[in-house]
Each structure stands twice: as structure tokens, then as C-alpha cells.
């Protein structure tokens, strides 16, 4: 279980760079689950070869679920890069220009026109960014990401607050974080933040997740680095009331 989660939002492209959110975390929290995947990495071993695009495809919701759930323990070390698509027939309608754009997208992880292709009707474009569990994901609907982030923070909180409980004591439950509350974090996510989940004890019935701004300085996401900074806000869970709330530092101004 990670001690921190890094998030950097780009609203121009509806993309997020994250660390600490796994493939499983991503898939389990989705509302619009992919039914088919076009794998943009030509070296991918999974899937079936599609002669029209020259890429591998995974078709059918069951096969997609199996693929995404097993990525954490895969033997294939090729970088995970994919876009979903709704209809296999429309895949065959892609023009050479559109295929070239998809190949560029997979290679550079930057789109030429839009990360969302009309013929594919994709809701996501997913890219691993090398090592250390960094990912960039493009979301057609940002609420999908807020749900993923909320579920991850709840999962971490559940483990943390029950870590030192006696074997004979019942685990404390953790309520979901309302999406409305997570949307309030947007201004901070645009800056690039780390959610520090290292607190292991409940103090005065509260578990706190402080937020530290690190921007795109990924090297500062290591705990021994960002904790030297001043927290700009915190998500707080009250174990007695089973409620979440958001606290901002009064003397912090993002406009500076």
C-alpha cells in the first residue's frame, strides 16, 4: 500500500499524470468500462493482430477485464499503452492518416489533434510512463478520475487506521469520499500535488491526509523530500461521524 499518491491534472487535454494508482485501482472504479482495447505499443504481446492498423486488439468486455486485472503480474514487460474503442467495424474504417495519428500518439504519448477519436468513440487513452508506476491517462469524463482517486484514498485510509488494531477487534469502516468534495481539489491538482497517507494513528477521531504541492518535479514525490515542504491543505476523515471534509491553509494563496 503506497504511503503517497501523486496527481497532476491538465484540463486542456483532460489528462492526469499519477503515481500510486495501479491498473487494478483504475479498472475497479470505472463506470464506463472499456469493451475493446487497441494496444498502441507495437511490441505488445497480448491481444490479436489487427491487419488494418498493424496493432494488437483485445475484444470483448470479459477479455478486457482479464487483461487489465492481470497487468500487475504480467510477464510481458512492454510498456502498457492503449485506447478503448466501441465497435470493431469502425476500427476497419480508420484512414491511413488516423492510423498515423494513433501511432504518433502511442510513440510520443501526446496527441496531434485530440486524444478522443470520433470513429473509436474512446473514453480513455492510457500510457505507462516508464518505471516507478507513473501513468498518464486521458479521460473523456473527469468524474471517472475523481471516483478512482476517492476509492484509492479510502482504500489507503482503511488500511492505515486499522493497521495497529488488535486481531480481536472489528475493523473500522471508512465512508466513500463524495465526488463533490474531490472536485474542490481541482485547483490544487492543476499545480501537481502529493497526498501524504503516512499517518498511521487516528488522533482525536481524525485521520488526516495532507496535500503538498510539488508541481511536475517528480523527484520531489518521494516522501523524504516532499514532507520538508509546508502542507497546503488536508483531507480529513472523522472516524466517529464517518464523514470527510477538506481543510485549506488560510495563509496559502495559489495565485502568488
Image (cartoon, helix red, strand yellow):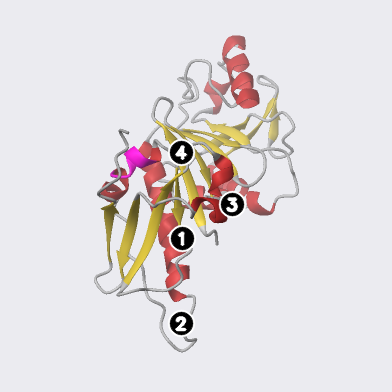
Quadrant in the picture for the C terminus:
top left
Quadrant in the picture for the N terminus:
bottom right
- Among the two numbered marks 3 and 4 on one chain, the one whose residue lies closer to the N terminus: 4
Residue marked by disc 3: 69
Label 1's element?
A: loop
Label 4's element?
A: strand
- Mark 2 and mark 3: Cα distance apart in space: 30 Å
Residue marked by disc 2: 165
Residue marked by disc 4: 8
Residue marked by disc 1: 197
Of the two numbered discs 2 and 1 in the rendering, the one whose residue sits closer to the viewer: 1
- Mark 3 and mark 4: Cα distance apart in space: 24 Å
Percent position (x, y) of residue 243? 26, 64
Given residues 31 and 89, the one toward you in this image is 31
- Among the two numbered marks 2 and 1 on one chain, the one whose residue lies closer to the N terminus: 2
Percent position (x, y) of residue 76? 74, 44
Residue 187 among magenta residues: yes
Given residues 84 and 188, the one toward you in this image is 188
- Mark 4 and mark 1: Cα distance apart in space: 17 Å
- Mark 3 and mark 1: Cα distance apart in space: 24 Å
| Residue in view at x 59 percent, y 43 percent | 219
59 up-or-down from 157: above or below: above
Residue 62 among magenta residues: no
Label 3's element?
A: helix
Amino acid at each position: 500500500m503506497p504511503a503517497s499518491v501523486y496527481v497532476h491534472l491538465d484540463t486542456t487535454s483532460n489528462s492526469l499524470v499519477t503515481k500510486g494508482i495501479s491498473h487494478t485501482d483504475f479498472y475497479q472504479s470505472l463506470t464506463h468500462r472499456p469493451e475493446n482495447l487497441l494496444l498502441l505499443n507495437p511490441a505488445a504481446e497480448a491481444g490479436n493482430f489487427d491487419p488494418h492498423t498493424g496493432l494488437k486488439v483485445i475484444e470483448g468486455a470479459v477479455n478486457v477485464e482479464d487483461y487489465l486485472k492481470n497487468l500487475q503480474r504480467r510477464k510481458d514487460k512492454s510498456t502498457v499503452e492503449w485506447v478503448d474503442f466501441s465497435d470493431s467495424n469502425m476500427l476497419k474504417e480508420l484512414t491511413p492518416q488516423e492510423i498515423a495519428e494513433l501511432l504518433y500518439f502511442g510513440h510520443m504519448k501526446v496527441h496531434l489533434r485530440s486524444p478522443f477519436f470520433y470513429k473509436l468513440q474512446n473514453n480513455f487513452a492510457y500510457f505507462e510512463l516508464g518505471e516507478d508506476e507513473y501513468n498518464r491517462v486521458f479521460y473523456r469524463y473527469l468524474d471517472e478520475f475523481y471516483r478512482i482517486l476517492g476509492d484509492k484514498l479510502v482504500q489507503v485510509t482503511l488500511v492505515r487506521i486499522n493497521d495497529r488494531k488488535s486481531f480481536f477487534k472489528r475493523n473500522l469502516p471508512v465512508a466513500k469520499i463524495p465526488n463533490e468534495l474531490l472536485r474542490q481539489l481541482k485547483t490544487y491538482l492543476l499545480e501537481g500535488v502529493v497526498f501524504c497517507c503516512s499517518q498511521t494513528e487516528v488522533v482525536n477521531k481524525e485521520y488526516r491526509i495532507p496535500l503538498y504541492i510539488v508541481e511536475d518535479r517528480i523527484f520531489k514525490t518521494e516522501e523524504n523530500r516532499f514532507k520538508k515542504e509546508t502542507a497546503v491543505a488536508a483531507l480529513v476523515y472523522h472516524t466517529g461521524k464517518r464523514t470527510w471534509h477538506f481543510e485549506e491553509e488560510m495563509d496559502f494563496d495559489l495565485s502568488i
